[in-house]
Image (cartoon, rainbow, N blue to C red):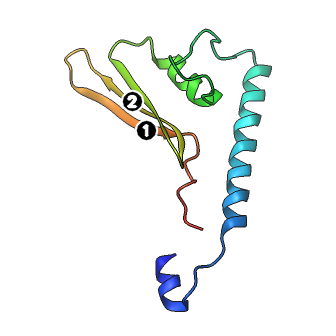
């Protein structure tokens, strides 16, 4: 985007593309939730992150599936652009890191217009 702006003097308007991608992601997540409900695999409604009332179902489900596992730790924070961000680590019984990662509520929100 920056290179195009340097060459042409203006950045292309990708607002419609960004909006379409976000709508498609929401539709996919909604259909996934509907499929899980139809299959009877609903998320444990008793799992809530303290102080967060509006976390999306897919992030809650990820945490609900793993939070009780030994060695699993996570941190939740809110970013003004990407929404809720879940940072997680999983440790082995010896204390070494087995895996780690980060999930965002709106992973494509950072794309510049």
Q: Quadrant of residue 29?
A: top right
Q: Position of residue 30 (x, y in %)?
A: 75, 35
Asked if the residues shown at circle 2 and circle 1 are in contact, with their CB atoms under 8 angstroms apart, the answer is: yes
Residue for point 52% across, 83% down: 5
- Quick check: 50 left or right of 16? left
Near mark 1 (Cα within 10 A), the count class, few <14, some 14-19 or many ≥20, is few
Label annotation for residue 88: 2
Which badge, 2 or 1, comes first in the chain's sequence? 2
Q: Position of residue 97 (x, y in %)?
A: 26, 28
Q: Position of residue 59 (x, y in %)?
A: 56, 29
Residue for point 72% across, 33% down: 32
Residue for point 52% across, 20% down: 51
Name the quarter where the C terminus is drawn.
bottom right
Q: Mark 1 points at which residue?
A: 102
Q: Position of residue 95 (x, y in %)?
A: 21, 20
- Quick check: 113 left or right of 72? right
CA gap, disc 2 to disc 1?
6 Å
């Amino acid at each position: 985007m920056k290179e195009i702006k340097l060459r042409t003097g203006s950045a292309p308007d990708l607002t419609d593309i960004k909006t379409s991608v976000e709508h498609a992601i929401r539709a996919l997540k909604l259909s996934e939730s509907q499929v899980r409900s139809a299959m009877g695999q609903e998320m444990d409604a008793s799992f809530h992150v303290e102080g967060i009332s509006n976390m999306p179902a897919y992030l809650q489900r990820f945490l609900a599936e793993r939070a009780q596992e030994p060695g699993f730790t996570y941190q939740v924070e809110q970013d003004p652009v990407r929404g809720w961000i879940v940072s997680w680590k999983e440790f082995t019984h010896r204390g070494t890191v087995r895996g780690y990662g980060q999930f965002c509520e709106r992973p494509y929100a950072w794309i510049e217009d």
